[in-house]
Every structure is written in structure tokens, then in C-alpha cells.
Image: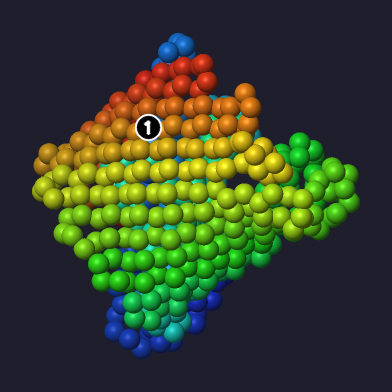
Amino acid sequence: MKKMFMVSLVFALVAGARLLWADEDESKEAAPSIADKVSLELEFNASVLSVDSEGVVDSMTDAGFGDDASSLSVGYEDERWGATASFLFSPETWRIFYDDFDVDHFPLSIDELYVWVKPFGEHFKFTGGVFSNTDGVADYTDDIDNFGMGVFTISEEGEAFEEPYDLSDPSLTNGLLTDVAFGPVTVQLLLAPNYGKESASAWASELFDEDIESNRRLFRIGGRAIVDVGIGTLAAMVKTFQWPMSIAAVMEELDSPLGTKANFTTFGVYFDFTGVENLGISLGYTGLLTTVDHSSWDNTLWSGIDLRGTWTGIEGLSISTHNNFSFAKGAENAMWLADDDASFITIYDAVGATKELNERFSINAEVSNTFSKTDFGGAEEIKFDNLCVGAKFIAHVGEHAEFNAGLKVDFTKEGDDKLTVFSIPVGIKISF
């Protein structure tokens, strides 16, 4: 029901925006056709076959190159308004054709669903819906299928780490985003009240190991300033996820010292250097601060430092790198790492290169290593180490289609357990 409501809301906004400028558009010269303004992209990534060192054989899984998900995206862009609908699906979706179809596990999930308008020219832009905005934070990972920028944290599922996501990365996500741009300065403001009711309750249930059903909602606000400094851009971002715990009775029953409100505040500063031809460098710091309004609770800071780069100084060759160092220090009454001697670090390093053989064919190779260690104080600790090596052959068919296939090897060590996985990833990308 919520997804249907969101879809209806977005397309209602699109229709309203179109009607707003209908008369003005008719008075102008003939505009480009609808086909010129509509974009369509289908991307499929999967491992057609994988074999691990324990003898397990699998096929059609998500273990393709990196963690790229398969997706279907449709977009429309005019001078004054646009809309995007993007859906994710699993390679295992094809199994519904011969398995019993379970309506509770619909094969598509919403990735992005939003509309933007510029009612007053180029200086103001309004975006509403489900989206992820990272303006001012350079990517530079064309040759790598890797993690995003931000802070690695402890995984809620008890695994070694959680990669940066919307709580701990530089993105402003979901709600109403306002852009104000004048000269070299752009300011963005995000407002998203009552977002994520279900996820907040699920989060509470997992955190306290209790079945909690409540009206708790995440209230998120944020902002970003981007300045063009001539040799690149400088961006500063802050956002907060406020979690009102309005039913104190549940907290008392669980004997929780959290009080009535918890805040997860993320902030960061990012510099994109473009002052040298064929070279791009992005350096950023992201901090995640967990705070609660109870005096007996220790607030903790999680930090992530990112360095990304790309170089295209040789014709037909590009090289990309990404390095992240994330860390945190524990405290006696912290929400996580609840010990003065507790600590967390994750080190991620990756490099990739793409070489064009001719106009139609190219090859790509990448290698990455992720090391994570969580020390809970005393003898308990979690260690994780992963080395991934992959190479693929890429074929361009015309202007709209791309195919790739290759080989990937994953070496993983978690504690005393070791596992090696050989896989044959393939990918298809069709865009118009």
C-alpha cells in the first residue's frame, strides 16, 4: 500500500508540473520529441556459475562484479522538470517462471522514484520522492565496482562490518530536497518527516532483541553547501536521523537508559581536485555521531576517511583507485562498542584499470582488499579479511548495448574460517 501511495504521489506531481507550463510550452517553437526526453536503461549483473572451496556449486546469483544490482530505470527530463523511476531485481527472479510465485516476495523493489522541478529558472530546484543525492562528492570509480564513500560500521546482522549506506554516507536521501544556486555556491536543504516507520520499529526490535511494534518514526533533515573554488569544488554536509521514542512505557519495560530520543548525525567535508588535466582526486572525511538524551549514555563517534582518484593520461586507458579507513573508539555505556577498551577499524583498498582495445572492445581488471577488526574489549573480537581479484571482457554493440563476461576470485578469512569462491560473472546493459 505504501509503495502504491508513493507511486501515485510522484506521478501526480509530474502531471501537475506538466500542466503548470502547458500553455507556455505551446507558445514556443516546436520542442524536441518525447522520445528525445525519455531515457530507458536495463542493467543485468549476475554470476552464471560459482564454485567455492567447500564444493558448493551455485548459479544465477547476485555475485557478479562488485555488488552492482540488476536494475530497470526509466527517466524523463525537460528544461524545467523531470522524473525518474528505478527498480532493483535479483538474478534469481527468473526462477519464478517455474517455481510457485510468492506474492509476498515481489521480484522488483523501488530504488529511486522521484520528480524534480525548476519553476523559477536555474537558481532553484525542488526534488521530491525516493532518491539518493551526492552532489559535490566526486565518484571517480568508473573502473571499480566497489563500496561507496562514508563510514564502515558494525553490521547489525553480526557480521564483520556494514558498508557505508544512507545513514553513514555523504548522500541526502528521500523526502523534499531544495537546491538554491547562485554563482559558484549551491546550497541544498533536505526535509523528510516521519520517514521509515517500519524500519525504525524493526531496528528497535533487533537492537533490544524484543518484538517491538510502535509508532516510532525516523525524522531526517540535512543540508549541504558546495563551492566552486577554481581548481575543484569544496562541499560540506550534515544530516541527522532523529528517532523519537514516544512510548516511554516500552523503554521502561526493557529497562533501557535511552530516554525519549536518539539522534544519528552524519557530517562531512569533501574536496574534489580537478586542477591537473587527466587527473581527478577526491578527499573526504565523514563522521557518524550517535547521541541520546540521557545523561548515563555515552555518545560515540565513528569516522571514515576516503581518498579516490582517477587518471586518464594515456589515450584509451583509465585507472581508478579508492581507499577508505574507518574507525571508532568504544565507551562503557555506548550503544555499540560498550567497553572503554573496545575499538573498530576497517581498511578498504581498491584499484582498477580499463583499456580500450578498439572502438568496440575493451578489457577491465580490478583488485580490492577489505580488512576489518572489531575488538569488544577483552578476549572477544571479530576479524575479517577479503581479497578479491577480477577481470572481464567488455563488448559494445552499437550505441545502446554493452555486454561483459569474466572471472572473479574471492579469498575470505573470518576468524579461523577460510573460503575461496571462483565465479563467472556476466553483465548486460541496454540504454536509450
Q: Write the residue at 40% across / 38% down.
A: 348
Residue 191 in the figure: left or right of residue 51: right
Q: Write the residue at 39% across / 49% down.
A: 306
Q: Residue furthest front?
A: 340
Please count the marks in the image. Answer: 1
- In percent of width and height, residue 210 lies at 79, 38
Toward which corner of the image does residue 322 lie, by quadrant? Answer: top left
Q: Is residue 12 above or below residue 62?
A: below
Q: Write the residue at 50% across / 43% down.
A: 327
Q: Write the residue at 54% across / 37% down.
A: 344
Residue 342 in the figure: left or right of residue 232: right
Q: What is the quadrant of the C terminus in the image?
A: bottom left
* Residue type of the residue flagged with mark 1: Asn
- In percent of width and height, residue 354 lies at 21, 40
Q: Which residue is labeled 1 in the image? A: 369
Q: Residues within 10 Å of mark 1 (few under 14, many from 20)?
A: some
Q: Nearer the viewer, residue 261 or 291?
A: 291
Q: Is residue 317 visible?
A: yes
Q: What is the quadrant of the N terminus in the image?
A: bottom right
Residue 200 in the figure: left or right of residue 79: right
